[in-house]
Image (spheres, grey):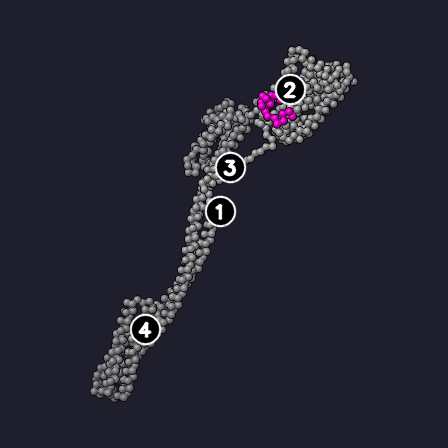
Amino acid sequence: MRIPQMIAAELRRLTATRMSVIALVALLAVPILYGGLYLWANQDPYGNLSSVPVALVVDDDGGDVNGQQRNLGDEAATQLLDDGTFEWHRVSSDAADAGLSAGDFDFVVTLPADFTDAVASLATDAPRQADIELRTNDANNYLASTIGTQAVARIQSSVAQKVIDEAGLTLLDALHTIRVNLVDATDGATRLVDGLASAADGSAQLVDGSTSLADGSAQLADGTAQLADGATRLHEGTSQLRDGSAQVADGAQQVAAGVDRIDAAAQQVGTVAGDAAALLPQARADIAAALTDAGLDETRVDEILARLDPVGERLGAANTRVQDTVAQIGQLDAGARQVAAGSAALATGAATADDGAASLADGAASAASGAAQLRDGSAQLRDGAARLDEGIDQLSAGAVQLRDGLAAGVAQIPDSDDATRQAQADAISDPVAVGTSAVTKAQNYGAGLAPFFAALAGWIGIYALFLIVKPVSKRAVTALRSPVRVTLAGWLTPAGLGALQMVGLFTVLAVALQFSFANPWAALGILLFASATYAAIVLALNVWLGSVGQFLGLVLMVLQLVTAGGTFPWQTLPGPLAALHHVLPMGYVVDAMRQVMYGGDVSRVGPDLLVLGAWMVGGVLVAAIGVTRMTHHRTLRDLQPSLIG
């Protein structure tokens, strides 16, 4: 009996009755229904989140945000309701709790009463985080908790972006205002520098003038001191004159006796009196000039001179009388009585002159004292002007530093318009734009799971077929005694039926679910190759272990379900299971399907197929060895019916 005949005989057995046909069709449909229904149910769950009922509770009381009364909770709620990502229901807290417990809502999002105040606190000296409360009920759906966490994260990001955008714009506007004010301050500092430069020039002139004043006042002090000394000597002279005139009066009585001596004395007195009278006008002019230079006004000078004028007049009169007396000396004998009277008058005038000279000495001393004070004051003025000049220089240097610092501050703050500041605020609130690119990309969530569930469905289909397909024909083993042909027939029968399953499953994926395939024929070929490989493995288990081997096929399916890396990356598996990923065939089927379905690296398909080919050849060889054993050794166990069928 040839291999096709053995296959045909097995197919006739499987279709001998109506029930057997129904059973065969049902088992052929198992992977199609499993893979098709599961992937249909999970085709695009994230695209249907708008049907997930979510309760939204807004207890926010609102508050002052940047000087405006706002309610950020209401604003966030309006945005969420308009967004439509979920089926939002804005309800009270009690209604949300009741709905969450009853399963009417998958999760509850609550914006508390202080939500706006907490956000606004970012601009105060006591900032705090704003809370968003998420309440879930895993009894409704565990994944709803994960989805709810992602939803709250999006709300948090949206609110944060909005707040930061507004705060950033406010900050940038404030910086712009600061820059404008700094520009004004820089202009003012520039004007201050220019003004201080002018003040420095003026203070330098003040220093020069005060120095000249100090020198002049020193010279004036020296002149008034000399005047005081002269006035003192004049006083001493008038005192002597007073004493002399008194002596003249006393000696007038002796004139007659000593005409020669009196004549000589009279000549001397006449000479002295004439000289003194001649000096008075010049002395009066010098005194007036000295008092004027000392800073006395004209009225005061006139008052002082008015006191001195009588002295001068009396000195002039005395001079006249002295001269007359001298002229009349020759007549002493006849006018002795007159001489005595004249000498008495002279004594009186001399006393008056002495008093005037004393007043002149006192005035000159006062003028000298005032001139000394003027000298000291002008010296202090000169020193103060010098310190003022140094202070202005320091102030000017500080003003230059201030101007340069303000100018540097202006340069560091960019000059921006309203549009630029708005763009900057937008960038601050969302500084990082995530650019995504994919070497390959699944069409949707269902397409992302398709390689795994198609590979798993292929194993389930083969496992189901071996519930009714006989691994080997006992009659053929007994009659032919050709283990290779018997093994190939026992393998090709489920492999062929498995191929029908894979064609049906591929049709559902490509047509009914409309999954896109970058290399559809390669994908179908991998499914067919994988089904044939699974058939070889399950065949070997059944040949060697019978119903126990069939059970081990179920165990292998479970192991591959968790080690194939069809959902989470296989690197997340525990160590022993991760090691099995590199051994068991289903992981290689998943990898190969991903490459041809998504348009990935086709060069990776070759090594995957080599591993599958090794499992296929190994399975067929092991099965052939088992069939060879059957041709030589038959036991009572071989005659016992299988526990499975």
Magenta stretch holds residue 514: yes
Residue depicted at 41% across the width and 36% down the height? 68
Relative to residue 169, is residue 551 depicted above or below? Answer: above
> Which comes sooner in the sequence, label 1 or label 3?
1
Q: CA distance from mark 4 to mark 2?
A: 145 Å
Q: CA distance from mark 1 to mark 3?
A: 24 Å
- The answer to the question of whether label 4 and label 3 lie on touching residues, with beta carbons closer than 8 A, is no
The magenta segment is 501-522
Describe residue 87's horizontal placement relative to residue 223 as left or right: right
Taking the image as drawn, is residue 66 in sight? yes
> Which comes sooner in the sequence, label 4 or label 3?
4
Q: Quadrant of residue 170?
A: top left
Q: Which residue is mark 1?
A: 412
Q: Quadrant of residue 579?
A: top right
The residue type indicated by label 1 comes to Gln
Q: CA distance from mark 2 to mark 1?
A: 72 Å
Q: In front: mark 2 or mark 3?
A: 2
Residue nearer the viewer, 299 or 628: 628
Residue depicted at 73% across the width and 15% down the height? 5
Residue nearer the viewer, 280 or 315: 280
Q: Which residue is mark 4?
A: 286
In the structure shown, which secondary structural element does the residue marked by tag 2 occupy? Answer: helix
**Label 1 neighbour load within 10 Å: few <14, some 14-19, many 20+:** few
- The answer to the question of whether label 2 and label 1 lie on touching residues, with beta carbons closer than 8 A, is no
Describe residue 614's horizontal placement relative to residue 356 as left or right: right
> Which comes sooner in the sequence, label 1 or label 4?
4
Q: Which residue is mark 2?
A: 501
Q: Which residue is mark 3?
A: 430
In the structure shown, which secondary structural element does the residue marked by tag 3 occupy? Answer: loop
Q: Main secondary structure of the magenta part?
A: helix
